[in-house]
Amino acid sequence: MENDSVAIQNVLEKETTRRGFLKGVGVATGAAVAAVAVGKIKPAVAAKEAAPKTVKKNLFAERQNCVGCRACEYACSMYHEKTVRPAKARIHVLKYKGVVDVPVICWHCDDAPCIEACPTTPKAIQKDPKTNGIKLNKDLCLGAKCNKCIEACPAKFIRRDPDDGQVLMCDLCDGDPECVKACLAQSGNPVGPCLMTGNVGFGVNRAYRNVTPEEAGDDLLRRLFYPNETGERRK
Amino acid sequence: MAAPQGGHFGRILEIDLTQQKHKVVNIDAEICRAYMGGAGLAVHLLFDALKAKHDPLAEDSPIFIGPGPLNGTYCVSTRVSFANKSPYTGLLSHAETGGHFPNEVKWAGWDGIFIRGRSKRPVYLYIKDDDVKFMDAKAIWGKDTHETEEMILKQIKEPYARVACIGPAGENEVPYACVIVERFRAAARTSTGCLMGNKKLKGIAVRGTKAVPVVDMDKFYKAATVSKQFALDHEGWQGIKRWGTAGLLELKNYVTGSLITKNYQTTWYPDIEEIGAEQANRTFWQKHSACNHCPVHCQKLGVIRGGEFDGLIAEGPEYETGGLLGSNLGIADFDGMMAAIELCDAMGLDAISAGGSIGFAMELVQRGIITSADMDGMSLEWGDYEAVIEMIKKITYKEGKAGKLLAKGVRRMAEEIGKGSMDYAVHVKGKEMAAHDPRGDKPRAVSYTMGTCGGDHHEANSPAGQAKRCMHNSLVMCSFVGGYWSPKMFVDMLGPLCGWNMTEKEFWTTAKRIRTLERCFNVREGISRKDDVLPKRMLTEKLPEGPKKGAVVTPAEMKKIQDDYYAYFGWNENGIPTQETLKGLGLEFAIDQIKGA
């Protein structure tokens, strides 16, 4: 299973670095660009020199692939709470209109509106230098009294702990997200994994995160199930 | 009275719809161990709660909705059992369905919901952990299951809750109305929908935020991981994962020779490729959908593109829905078949009984026993999907002469029509058989004839298999997942989960206890050997074509099935559990109840 995950990771990284490479050499000769585009030169090899090595970790959800099994919620609560309790998971899956499934994740935004909104000094929410993701310091957090980060989150991801009203924040499991592993193990034949980590999906992060779960569900429903021009469901 | 340590919460939610009140009933650890949960706990509770010949539609007739000990834990256990005395057959019935609703019930802290009484006005239940609300369903009454779910979720303002509800068929008390869970899943074969309609209970919305107690988490996690990985690696899953159960449509036609066609007249359907999995894959499927924590995601959702039904979102075809509303009715139009399946889901009708009844009517028209005048002027020819869709609507609202007649189901239709129509009525104990023809697929005869509910394709194909299936239904587990698990795997998980020192022997004893008590319930209603038989057509008419041409279930084969089965469970030659068996299983209380049978 580990080999698979590495293999998929490599494929994904190739994709993204290639895109970055093409952007970077946009002014190069047309012949060279065309050669890369049709695959005469292996882009990964070429990109190796151009793209700087990064340790940045992201969480990314390919919403179309989600089948709504909620294995991610299981894995998350097993890791953080040592029991199966999806209500306390740091990732949720919304069933929208009974048809599509929307994974609701923390995108660990670069500009992090939740950090900006956090009222404490020093801030309870900070960037974790290890993963470059969001990290919550429970001791500094005002807990049930404060609502600032929940309001600020553009993806409407942040939820409260049903026991003590503390906010539940994804911490990327210190750089090796359990939900991603669980998703990969469950997926396949023919649906690919929905959750991915690593240097993936960069550039689309903003567009993906700036929608609420309901808007994302609406979009999915429209994209997958309303192919006709009127966009209305037949009675 | 001891409270259970793990796996169970030891609490059942008892709902009184008449008084609009609820209370908590504690259940003993001993009972939890003896009956597990789900269908097992249901038969324990219903056997006490109901007397012989109790009217299933009386005000105090109960419905039990129960998850099992493994639900909501790391183990892949995704189902819930709906159990009641069926107003359709008059027998004990339980139907299992998957989704996320079952585990939400468990996470809300309940081992079961026991519903009695009858409300004066339409209501639905909203259960959030210990908080139980009776909500007004006046505005929702009359809506189809899809709209109902959407409206309930909007009203309770909890998008993460899961809903089980009935459609117009249940409200109109069609005897084979079902409960639809999360829009496309059905607990169909118990007539629970009819009972809920009778009780004016439109639906149940549940959201749970608790965790199931586990005695030894490390050991349990290990055992559950082993069983999950076993299932993930098993080849048997891959086909279902890729094609759903629709893939069986082609398989049963070309290889097994058991795809029912034109009301069981044959098992060869030349147009299968028009309605099978490949057609669905090419033109229809858009998305897979999974039950809670399940890696199989056998449910396939799709949308019809172009034509008469453009834009219709539906689920399927599954093997049963595609068989009963496709090949059984001679339909070769994929879109028309999907529209009929979707309509059954929306109206809350059991697609198997609905398809069986319409197929039966079509054959009677073919043979000239009834005419289109009896069917409100509809021609009802094989393959006429427009007539099928029209008829499903008529059944739902019991409209006209035809709607009223077909809403009664195959057995009562045949009794009413007479003229030798009983020869073509395919049912066991009053319930229509599913889409596997037992002439082509002989082990299936065990499931149909010996299962508790009658006409049930899902009760396993051998005595030992049925015992194991009893445990699946009590734990409550999907047989696509648990089907390949050995009893040892179950025991390894239940031990650390519940703190039991369980052996494989106890596993089998528990299974036999549950199955025998189910039998006692039905024996009390007058069931015996004479009822455990296939319909006449299966025993007399040879298959005219297909891979199993000439096959028929002989009386000797039928006798052997019965004898082996009764011997395995320790019942006498008439199918009545003996006193020794009952004593050995700790069911002494049932001895008096079945005396004289």
Image (cartoon, rainbow, N blue to C red):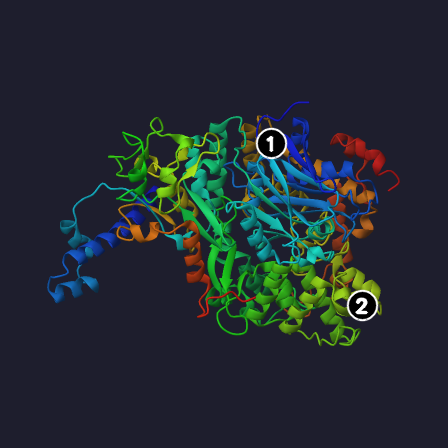
Find residue B358 and report its image quarter. Answer: bottom right
Q: Is residue B444 visible?
A: yes
Q: How many other residues sit within 10 Å of disc 1, few (<14), some (14-19) or many (≥20)?
A: many
Lower position in the chain sequence, tag 2 or tag 1: 1
Q: Say left or right for B106 vs B93.
A: left
Q: Say left or right for A157 vs B211.
A: left
Please determine if labels 2 and 1 lie on a single subunit: yes
**Which residue in the protein does label 2 denote?**
B421
Q: How many other residues sit within 10 Å of disc 2, few (<14), some (14-19) or many (≥20)?
A: many
Q: Position of residue B563 (x, y in %)?
A: 76, 46
Checking the image for residue B166, the label placed there is none
Q: Amino acid at mark 1?
A: His
Q: Quadrant of the C terminus of chain A?
A: bottom right
Q: Say left or right for B144 vs B17.
A: left
| B487 or B519: nearer the viewer | B519
Q: Is residue A162 above or below residue A5?
A: above
Q: Chain of mark 2?
A: B
User: Looking at the image, do the residues carrying marks 2 and 1 touch, with CB atoms under 8 Å apart?
Assistant: no
Q: Residue at x 77, y 34 (%)?
A: B581
